[in-house]
Amino acid sequence: METMRTQEVTVNDLPWKIEHSTIRCTMCGSCVAACTFNAIEAKMERRSVTISTGHQPEPMQQHKAIPVILQKNSIAHACVGCGMCEKICPNKAIKPVRNLDSRYNVLARSGGTTIKRGGRNNLIQERTLDKIVVGRISQMTDPSLDAERHVFDILAPFGRVLPANKLPFAQENGELRLTAQTPPVNWIYPLIFSDMSIGALSTRAWEAIALAVGYLNEKHHLPVRMSSGEGGMPVNLMKSDFLKYTMIQIASGHFGWNRIVRAMPHMNVDPAGIIIKIGQGAKPGDGGLLPAAKVAEHVQAIRGVPKADLMSPPNHQGLYSIEESVQKMFMSMNAAFKFRVPVAIKCAASATSVSVYNNLLRDPYLICGGFFIDGIQGGTGAANEVSLDHTGHPIVSKTRECYLAAVKQGLQGQIPLWAGGGVGLTGNAAADAFKMICLGANGVFLGKLLIQLCGCVGNEHGRCNACSTGHCPTGICTQDPRLVKRLDIDKAAQNIVDYTLAFDMEMRKLMAPVGNSTLPVGRSDALVTTDRAIAEKLGIQYAC
Amino acid sequence: MVMQDLYGEFAEYKDKPLLSLACTQKGAKLVEDYMENNSFVQVHEWIPKVNKQPGLDIKAMPYYIFRNYDYPDYLAKASKEAKEELLLSTRLAIRELLEKNDQGYAFSFWPDVLTLKEIGDPRDIATYFGLWNDSGELLAKNIVVQCRQNTNYEIVRYAAHPFFIQGYTLCANGENTFYTKNKEFQKSLNKGYIGFESDSQNFLYTLHYVLHELKWPIKYYKHVITPLQFEELENRPDQAALQAIRQSLGHLEINGPNTIIGMLPDNSMMTCCDSKKLRPVVVGGDEETIAISSEVCGLNVILPDRDKTKDIYPNEREVVVINEELEVQRWKQ
Ligand code: SF4
Ligand code: SF4
């Protein structure tokens, strides 16, 4: 008899339990080799087995030592439910099962460390956007359009838009002519591939996204842009014409900017934009984090750093107010590219977003080219779980509030609003984007969906989300050369391209029935909701 | 209907602002007091003799008053802008006064412009006001009339076309699917952009904003309401200006089926359509009269003998302007 040691960790305490069938298993070992978290192992177990070997049934019970696959009793090696073992097993002998009785949260802080992980919020399951439908359909007095045959202008501004009465126009022979430079505005696809750095992503994953962007632009003429994330860019890319499809991000760690600055004289084309990242929806008020495990040699080179945990401070150094940030960051970033490249700002959605937006709208220099608000359901490569799950702000009402704040002052459209952080969470990005646009966003940005298209298996229900560990089982969020090879770049890029083309058609399928051939920014009358509280908060029609 | 460049009753008072009212007796008194307190001096009044024969389908108001005023003395030497501003704020103030007390409607207050609106069967309304008789009292060179009221929302007089602001008149046939966007933007552009009882008022306010406030040439109106697609813009020599306009006034774009008919302060009339040509419009005429009608049957009734081969059916990118000399200009956006 063994003594009960109730405090010891057992498989039953972990968030995922492995179900393994010895009858199906042939002990090929594929699952153990595939598990990047070292969560399972092959062991010998003494078991009671009944066997029959003759021509006729002659069952015999025996106690035998047989090889089995066992889950480890370990918090450090807890199964994350990624399902790679199940995917690779030729006999369907193994699979992870969610453990509703997990005690993981109680046990995982041993040694006084916080729980860290990547992925997304696992606490908020509410989806405002799913309670809203497009309820104003053109039928009688105005006709629906034909999604297949009409021409649709699905583009959004990126850059500071001047009010009409401030346009430097001169009139000559009945013609208006611009007499001075106006702030640069690029009209781009209303879907930005957002902010995932080389470092957070493997180079292959980053490359797959860049490849998809290139293909969408060159082959399909969809002007989709991607943001570099905070971590620099490969020098060759910066010197190539593809730079025009990329927005370069600068965050508080300024990682990668040595190289960017040195590459500037060699750039053939301007980048699509600059995004100053102030905050991130997944972990607002917390700086970036790249665990040492992921700081591989090429990451060190691109970012110009040694192998160590890379933590960006929660604030841009030397900034104490939005006004000052406008002066310093915006001015220098605008000046760096001679006022030819729009400079936008990205903040985590917060109870204070409207004040920030108002400040930007009223800035006398007219140089903020976009306000990106990132909601609580945004993703991250690494964060403290407490930040991921318990800090942040839902994106839908915040975007609406910002838009209405601009409307109140007649300033709507002057600083384009871009919303993200939960857009496309259920896989239906076009519907989400369309609704956000009707509520006042000019466009949306998304990241998690892209890596899901590359093969990421993480979800909002605690599956995987191990992006911070360096053990990403799909080769997306790791720098381990063996794991990175798991990612087929071409297939990943193809998936992103296909999804974006479908997104484009779905956008038309939503614009056509409301009779619009251009994006209905702020057309809240097109939406209805079955939830009274949402109707009241967003100022849209209640329907039941 | 809105009449401009008036003769008959009003021929002598072309430069004196004309107030068009439909109100109760109490409303008339309220307006009288207001005008007096604000130093407007009445110089002329015309009260139509109405035909109250039984059976007419009309929801008549007790009084219809058309009065010319002299500007207050202190404005004698004021600029055109100052006068225009005063006329607008006076009309808005009277409208508010009447609305607050539920005593009537003020449709226009502008020199040489008369507005008459009523609810009912258009033929009966004409009978009621004696419009079928050639009495010579109500005469004008330019008339914009619409015999069908907005059917989408509540039936109120302010929702009836045409709409008027500071010398600009407009009526429309169609549906403005960007009503909410237009309205939210226009509200902060000018204090006169109010009401929004009909989604067609948006077209008027944009016309007024582009021509009167921004002082842009008329061709840019079409570029504001139905901007060229980005792809088309790319090959234009004026791309920079057009793109700047499109992005700055994106909230004034209209995107639905529409025909717009406008009358401008210089007595010209214009028409254009939505960018997909989802609504009809036709321009036709003879030596003496040119008319714009949303359907050709309208032209056939009033100008049956015109040369129909000369009728113009403007396309989705076209603007047609008829000037005071009845010269017709048409151009593509
Ligand atoms: S589900 Fe993933 S983490 Fe769990 S045992 Fe299988 S491969 Fe390992
Ligand atoms: S599959 Fe990789 S990227 Fe996706 S959640 Fe897991 S660790 Fe993160």
Image (tube, coloured by chain):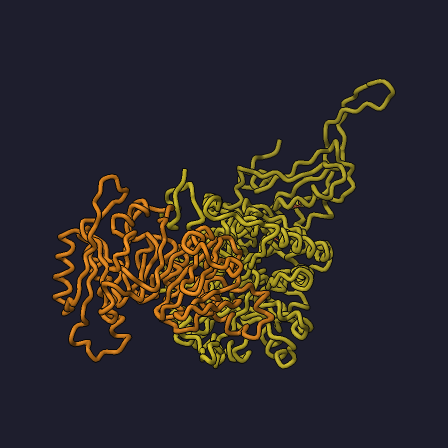
Does A26 appear above or below A370? above
| Left or right of A462, for residue B52 | left
Q: Can residue B291 be seen in the rendering of this structure?
A: yes
The x and y percentages for residue A44 are 74, 38
Depth check: B55 or B305 in front?
Answer: B305
Q: Does residue A178 sit above or below B102 in this rendering?
A: below
Residue A439 visible in the shown view:
no
User: How far across and down, in percent of the image, does residue A312 sit?
Assistant: 52, 67
Q: Nearer the viewer, residue B127 or A355?
A: B127
Q: Quadrant of residue A206?
A: bottom right
Q: Which chain is yellow?
A: A
Q: Measuring 30% from the left and 51% from the top, which residue is drawn there? A: B132
* Residue sitting at the far right: A55
Determine which quarter of the picture holds residue A461: top right
Residue A96 placed where, x, y %? 64, 40
Total number of numbered labels? 0
Residue B244 vs residue B171: left or right?
right
Residue B91: x %, y % from top left: 23, 63
| Quadrant the N terminus of chain B occupies | bottom left
Viewer-proximal residue, A338 or A276?
A338
Image quadrant where residue A102 sits: top right
Q: Nearer the viewer, residue A352 or A103?
A: A352
The chain coloured orange carries which letter? B
Q: Report whether A399 appears left or right of A145.
A: left
